[in-house]
Amino acid sequence: MKIALGVAIGGLGLSACVEDPEPARTALPYATGVEHFSPGPGAGWGAAHFPELVLGPPQGALNSAAAAGRDEVLSLGAGGEIVLSFEGLIMDGPGADFVVFENPFWIRNDPTQVWYELGEVSVSQDGESWHTFPCAAGGGEQPGQWPGCAGWSPTRVYDAEAMLPLDPAQTGGDAFDLADLGLEWARYVRVRDLLDDGNSTLDNVGFDLDAVGVVHSEAPPSEEK
């Protein structure tokens, strides 16, 4: 029946229309999974949209004129921590290897006056042993900077579909280099809020995680069966 129908259609000078499949979209280089989340006191902002809101590109507030919505960032709470995983491995390459996005902003557009909430960043290859970036929580030599910490560099407006590979100079956020820890690769990123305590009557205390993006990545080795 199928052959006869095909001949009949051909005899009438008709042709079947077959839509071309859409080209495969390049996977964006951001966290794809949450391995662990331990909220601290005062967490809760964004919980209704968790885990999706911390996966993929940053969505939170980009300047002091906008407040991050509950579907854009996740408040970790005082001392809260989260572990993210990725489709590929984070590799050590030239310069920064990954970027952590929070929602800080410059007060009155002054880079020395920053509204910030700091987080300590660690990486792991197996999810058990962790390597932590030294975080100058007391501030660096320059005002408005906390080297080695996340949560003080504003996110810039950019097109996540076009910004491939990621360029921290264009995206903003806090960039980290695996070479600073003597590592060639990592599989997981952990962010821990640095507040000692928080107001448990609030739900937006501490580090507000928006996203984690990867600058240098590589597909993980296939597991032998």
Image (cartoon, rainbow, N blue to C red):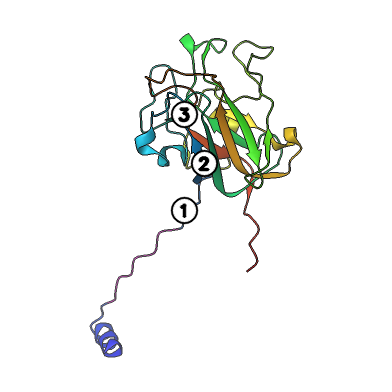
Q: Which numbered tag is attached to residue 36?
A: 2
Residue occupying the point 40% across, 59% down? 22
Residue occupying the point 28% across, 83% down? 10
In magenta, the rendered stretch is 15-23
Q: Is residue 135 left or right of residue 12?
A: right
Residue 40, given in percent of the width and then of the height, sits at 48, 27
User: Is residue 108 inside the magenta stretch?
Assistant: no
Residue 72, given in percent of the width and then of the height, sits at 40, 32
- List the residue tagged with mark 1: 25
CA neighbours of label 1 inside 10 A, class few (<14), some (14 to 19), many (20+): few
Tell me how far mark 2 sits from mark 1, CA to CA. Answer: 28 Å
Q: Is residue 66 left or right of residue 177?
A: left
Number of numbered discs = 3
CA neighbours of label 2 inside 10 A, class few (<14), some (14 to 19), many (20+): few
Where is the C terminus found, in terms of image quarters?
bottom right
Residue occupying the point 49% across, 38% down? 37
Sequence-earlier tag: 3 or 1: 1
